[in-house]
Amino acid sequence: MLVNTVIQLMPPFSGKDRSHAKDDVALHFVSQPELDKKMVRHGTVGVRLSTWRNPEVQKNTPAYSKIEEISLGARTLPRSRNLPAFAACVDEVVIAALTTARPSSEILRDAQRRIARERITFR
């Protein structure tokens, strides 16, 4: 990925622990409009309104013309100790959808069964 490549090319931080370099680079990218646009050109999802509203970005990826509208109705994930188990289940759904010929309905049914079996709730 582009961020990993940038980190590898970065000079060592003076007096700074390099274990946080990835976080620093990510913040650097999202804090600058032009860099966020460049990340979108490399296939990542832009995080800035200026990127979402950019006519060039919208022309190349028409979904960006609706992303702001869609995000306005988005809810935040609830805080729960079960979130990691739920995220693992979602990961399995995505991987199965991308790497198998199984019908989506079957993949989702199995995931829902796992969630029920493991009692993954957000209460």
Image (spheres, helix red, strand yellow):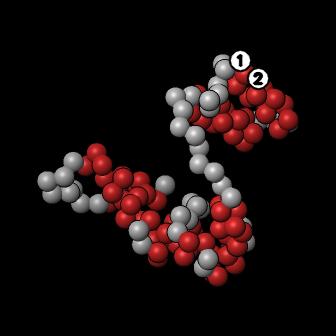
Q: Position of residue 95 (x, y in %)?
A: 68, 37
Residue at 52%, 69% (x, y): give it. Answer: 48
On the rendered image, what quadrant is the C terminus found in?
A: top right
Q: Position of residue 46 (x, y in %)?
A: 55, 65
Give the vertical position of 52 relative to 94 (above or below): below
According to the picture, the residue beneath numbered tag 2 turns out to be: 113
One can see residue 42 in this view: no
Outermost bottom residue: 55
Residue 101 as seen in the image, left or right of residue 78: right
Graded by Cα atoms within 10 Å as few (under 14), some (14 to 19) or many (20 or more), the crowding at tag 2 reads: few
Residue at 65%, 62% (x, y): give it. Answer: 72
Q: Front-most of 25 and 75?
A: 75
According to the picture, the residue beneath numbered tag 1 turns out to be: 117
Residue at 66%, 55% (x, y): give it. Answer: 74
Give the vertical position of 83 relative to 63 (above or below): above
Outermost left residue: 15
Outermost top residue: 117
Tell me the amino acid under the disc marked 2: Arg
